[in-house]
Amino acid sequence: MNNAQIRPITERGVPIPVGRPAQHSTPDHGDQSVTGILAVQGAFAEHAAMLDSLGAPWRLLRSAHDWDDSIARVILPGGESTTQGKLLRLTGLFEPISRHIARGRPVLGTCAGMILLAKRLDNDDNIYFGALDAVVRRNAYGRQLGSFRSVGSFASITDFPRVFIRGPFVVDTGPKATVESEVDGHPVGLRQGAILATAFHPELTGDTRIHELFLSL
Ligand code: GLN
């Protein structure tokens, strides 16, 4: 679905939760391929709504108790990476998600999620999962240019409405990561095995194709 409606966002770059409350609205039966959505902060509700529209089971990950072997894939949503990083540690979710990534299982990181995945940040000493072979700069787009929309490709998906909200800037990529999406020659979407990472927010559009690609991994 192209030319999708863009959902409202706040000045601070935090999407306004719209639609359903962030609960288990698509039942997960605990025995199939469940997507765990990191839900300690940020735009997790939009990812849940996206998976609902695809009929894919999901579970919010708020504490280590939410983790079990039925989690086949993980979404790291947009938001505030420093806060998310702290809460990942406090909730005990850092270890199981780290193990999941190390096993080469599917992960989709959008915006702050890309920051959490990067092997290094060039303007911040923190390293979180350190799995994605890329150097990323936080808040690289200034306030004026912080939020914009650009239609473009991600991998074989064309004409995708890419929504940027003070997104990370990919400074460099290593040999393990491939560039799947660019704006003016700068990478804004990466893939490394089953890791998909976008500097933009596919969950803030009505276009489900990147989520469908993720669910096919
Ligand atoms: N600027 C945020 C950060 O550094 C990311 C922006 C977003 O996820 N919308 O964490």
Image (cartoon, rainbow, N blue to C red):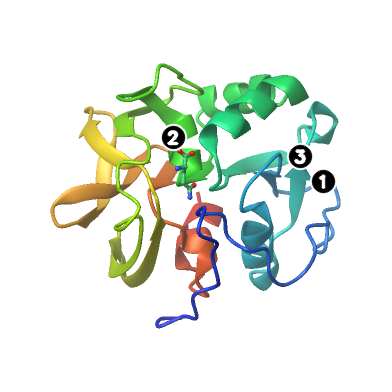
Find out whether the residues at labels 2 and 1 contact each other: C-beta distance under 8 Å: no
Q: Name the residue under label 2.
A: 115
Q: Is residue 178 left or right of residue 202?
A: left
Labelled disc at residue 208: none
CA gap, disc 3 and disc 2: 26 Å
Q: Residue at x 80, y 31 (%)?
A: 63
Per the image, label 2 sits on a secondary structure element best described as helix
Could you tell me residue 6's position as x and y percent? 49, 75
- In the image, what residue occupies the spot 62% across and 58% down? 47
Does mark 2's beta carbon lie closer than 8 Å to ligand 1?
A: yes
Residue 23 appears left or right of 128: right
Most distant residue in the left direction: 185
* Amino acid type, callout 3: Ser
> In the drawing, what numbered circle is on residue 70?
3
Q: Which of marks 3 and 1 is nearer the N terminus?
A: 1
Query: Which residue lies under the disc numbered 1?
Result: 31
* Residue found at the very far top of the displayed protein: 125
Snapshot quadrant of residue 30: top right
Q: In this view, does 96 lie above or below 62?
A: above
Q: What kind of residue is marked 1? A: Asp
Quarter of the figure with residue 119: top left
CA separation, marks 2 and 1?
31 Å
Height in image: 169 above or below 98?
A: below
Which residue is found at the position 61% from the left and 53% from the top? 43
Contact? badges 3 and 1 (CB < 8 Å)? yes
Estimate how packed mark 2 is, as few (under 14), some (14 to 19) or many (20 or more) residues with alpha carbons within 10 Å: many
Image coordinates for residue 109, horizontal then vertical, percent? 49, 43
Q: Is residue 197 visible?
A: yes
Q: Which residue is drawn at 52% across and 66% down?
A: 204
